[in-house]
């Protein structure tokens, strides 16, 4: 990837990483949309589009989960760590297009997806929604 284009990618991915670090999943989802747009406009980067779409849909589902349920801080930290691993490996892949990084990305995507799906089931079956929690007025 050309240096100037790669620098633009790094700027967009750093915004995404900052939003994930703050557990601001809606903001991270919006940053992932910007990555989709970026990869579309630079041309035939189908891998970049697929990876960005993965981030977009995963973060959207995580934002919805966080909106409706009181997610535990340890769970958010675990998901944040997995997303950071994914972004680090995505950077390696985008920069070098190595098969090794592509395989690692696929494995990390499976792990992230599994964690989100697991949380969706656990929370929908065992946790009370924020909307079910009575509001007290002091």
Image (cartoon, helix red, strand yellow):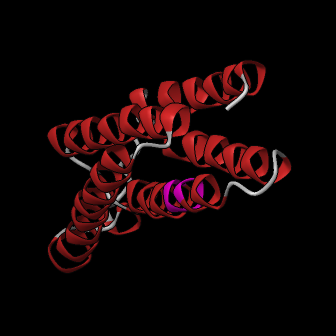
Q: Residue at x 26, y 76 (%)?
A: 124
Q: Position of residue 134 (x, y in %)?
A: 33, 60
- Where is 83 relative to 52, above or below? above
Q: In the depicted view, which residue is nearer to us: 35 or 121?
A: 35
Predominant secondary structure, magenta span: helix
Q: In the depicted view, which residue is nearer to us: 137 or 56?
A: 56
Q: Residue furthest right?
A: 41
Q: Is residue 138 visible?
A: no
Q: Image quadrant of residue 31?
A: top right
Q: In the depicted view, which residue is nearer to us: 133 or 112?
A: 112
Q: Position of residue 69 (x, y in %)?
A: 33, 59
- Where is 135 relative to 14, above or below? below
In screen coordinates, is 119 left or right of 4? left
Q: Position of residue 47 (x, y in %)?
A: 57, 58
Q: Image quadrant of residue 120?
A: bottom left
Q: Position of residue 74 (x, y in %)?
A: 15, 39
Q: Is residue 29 visible?
A: yes
Q: In the depicted view, which residue is nearer to us: 15 or 130?
A: 15
Q: Residue at x 78, y 50 (%)?
A: 37
Q: Which residues are magenta?
A: 51-55
């Amino acid at each position: 990837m050309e240096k100037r284009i790669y620098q633009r990618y790094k700027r967009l991915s750093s915004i995404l990483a900052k939003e994930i670090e703050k557990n601001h999943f809606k903001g991270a989802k919006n940053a992932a949309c910007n990555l989709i747009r970026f990869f579309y406009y630079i041309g035939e980067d189908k891998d970049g589009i697929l990876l960005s779409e993965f981030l977009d849909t995963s973060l959207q589902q995580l934002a919805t989960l966080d909106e409706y349920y009181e997610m535990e801080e340890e769970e958010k930290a675990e998901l944040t760590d997995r997303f950071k691993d994914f972004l680090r490996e995505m950077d390696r892949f985008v920069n070098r297009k190595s098969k090794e990084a592509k395989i690692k990305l696929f494995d990390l995507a499976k792990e992230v997806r599994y964690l989100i799906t697991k949380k969706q089931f656990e929370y929908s079956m065992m946790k009370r929604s924020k909307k079910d929690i009575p509001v007290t007025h002091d």
